[in-house]
Amino acid sequence: MPIVETTSIFKTYRSGVFKRVTVPALVDVSLSVDSGEIFGLLGPNGAGKTTFIKILLSIVHPTTGGATILGETLGSLKIKEKIGYLPENHRYPQFLTGYQTLHFFGGLSGLTGPALRDRALSLLDLVGLSEWKKVKIKRYSKGMLQRLGLAQALLNDPEILFLDEPTDGVDPVGRKEIRDLLKDLRKQGKTIFLNSHLLSEVEAISDRVAILNKGKVLKVGTVSEITSRALEYELRLDKTVSESLKSLILPHTTSLKVEGTSLIVGVKDQEALNTIIDRVRSEGIHLAGLQERKSTLEESFIELIQAKGQA
Amino acid sequence: MRYFAMFLLTIREAVLRGTLLFYFVVGNCIILFFAFALGLSPDDPSMITFFGNPLTPRNLGNINPIEFILIQVQRSSSSSILLFGVFAVAGLIPSMLEKGTVEVYLSKPLSRGALLLARSFGASAGVAVNLLYFAVGVWLVFGLKLGVWNGNFLLSFVAVCASFLLFFSIVAIAGVITKSAGFSIMLAFLYTFFSSALESREMFLFKIWGNEIYHSALDVLYYSTPQLSSMLENSSRIIGNLPIGPNANQPFDPLPFVYSLLSATVLYALSIRYFSKQDY
């Protein structure tokens, strides 16, 4: 059963003196996220990723459409008791120490007394800030603030975690620690919404990904579904490809490209690939190598965005 | 408890502002000044001395010299807390609405209305902490050194704190609409002068133009906004009636507080409605 389900969400921002200029931020966004998965939201700047998360948190009101989270409709305070949120470029009161910050936000989340104190201390330990707990956060580095923000989002032991650029400003070691922490949280059954511009990061930990562009959902699926192409192979040959060979193999391909002594062929199935290899050999050319071509999430992402841009 | 956390944080944020710290230091200096300056004559214990010299009352009518001093202290400190207080806390609503801050607050299980009220009450309480500290200090000095334990003096400061909270409704609505600390401060000061001009509208504003509609419009404005000037004037009357000045020998009038409570309630309700409808 989906833990988050959105139905045809539209969001249009109005600007200008008379609010006559309209900017569509989200167009007909319908998504569902299952319990216990890490769901990555990808898209170029201004795609609507943050707006989408903010709508789910009732920070932004949708123009039309709706959503349910944990079976409750948007706007319910009961939902927020089970949600943790790390916004992008978050700012906390500078005169507080790391511990005081967590104590304050824990209080806002409804924690009190020893439970609040213990939770704040254990989270500081979890994100590696125990030694900094008595230091005012105005002295924290960007990476440390990001870790503190993550601890803040985890204060109420949320069922769903919304993370907007969680590793922004964090060094590579810290990034890996955060990734490992998110994997641990998934093992505990938490659902995580991850909004990041670091595609490799999303690729590494997300179970499913949605690609947004100009407010529209372009594709939703697992990382392998998004990165899979029609079967494409690179055949490295010991001679240059002649025109007669090209005309011989062309009927068996879905695409054909020549790069020096390499042939890049798209095929419908393995049968067609074998036929092509036979034709190559029949021309007295030897096969020096054969490799399946698979795209990274980044390549798929760029292809998808560019394709929709041209459409 | 959730809203209390925001209320406490706001008080803390307010009292740490430089302007209120300055007020705190100045307040302490005034308390010390009275502690050293005031005394009773060893020859005549009914005679108050000021740096050892007898304090001779002039034409003060029914009021005694101690009450006269207390009223003057109350008036000057309540006017100055308005100045310092507005500078210190007018930016607290816009700072709560800053990008990166408001999102975290709104993601917590708190209603927007209660969040705004907790912030507004916290800001006013931050000012009240400073003002009441000063009032209690002066009250203790007068009690311990002169044997005058004037409860109305403390009560008048409670009235000033209430006046500030009601007046803050103007700052709150300006803050949520403009999200600008500078504009909120400017509007608060403009309103302070405006409130004073409205209170004495019959003497000045009515004389500018004799039109009845204009007069009625000024009356509506006066009764539909917090009557800051009248509230401050009446809060000092809790101690006693001054025999001098344009409003000499007027008794305490609770109506400005009642009207202001109603108008502030409307302004806070409008602020909450606006805040609840906004995207952040």
Image (spheres, grey):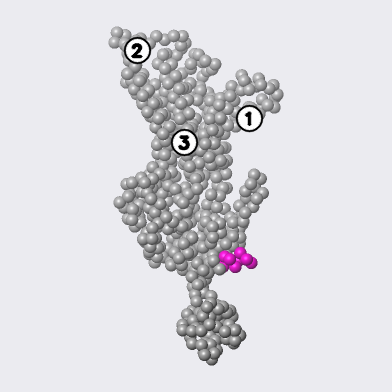
**Depth check: B251 or A280 in front?**
A280
The x and y percentages for residue B231 are 52, 26
* Camera-side mark, 3 or 1: 3
Q: Name the residue tied to disc 3.
A: B89
Q: Mark 3 and mark 1: span between their CA atoms? A: 28 Å
In the rendered image, the vertical position of residue A225 relative to residue B269, given as above or below: below
**Depth check: B110 or A190 in front?**
A190
Q: Residue at x 43, y 43 (%)?
A: B6
In the rendered image, the vertical position of residue B26 relative to residue A7, given as above or below: above
Q: Secondary structure at mark 3?
A: helix
Q: Name the residue tied to disc 1.
A: B220
The magenta stretch is: A304-311
The x and y percentages for residue A169 are 42, 55
Q: Does A134 sit left or right of B164 as displayed? A: left
Q: Mark 2 and mark 3: span between their CA atoms? A: 39 Å
Q: Give the letter of the chain under mark 1.
A: B
* Camera-side mark, 2 or 3: 3
Q: Main secondary structure of the magenta part?
A: helix
The disc, 1 or 2, on the residue closer to the chain's N-terminal end is 2
In the rendered image, the vertical position of residue B118 relative to residue A158, given as above or below: above
Q: Amino acid at mark 1?
A: Val
Tell me if residue A148 can be seen.
no
Q: Do marks 3 and 1 share a chain?
A: yes
Q: Which mark is residue A162?
A: none
Q: Mark 1 and mark 2: span between their CA atoms? A: 48 Å
Q: Residue at x 52, y 71 (%)?
A: A226
**Depth check: A275 or B119 in front?**
A275
Q: Name the residue tied to disc 2.
A: B49
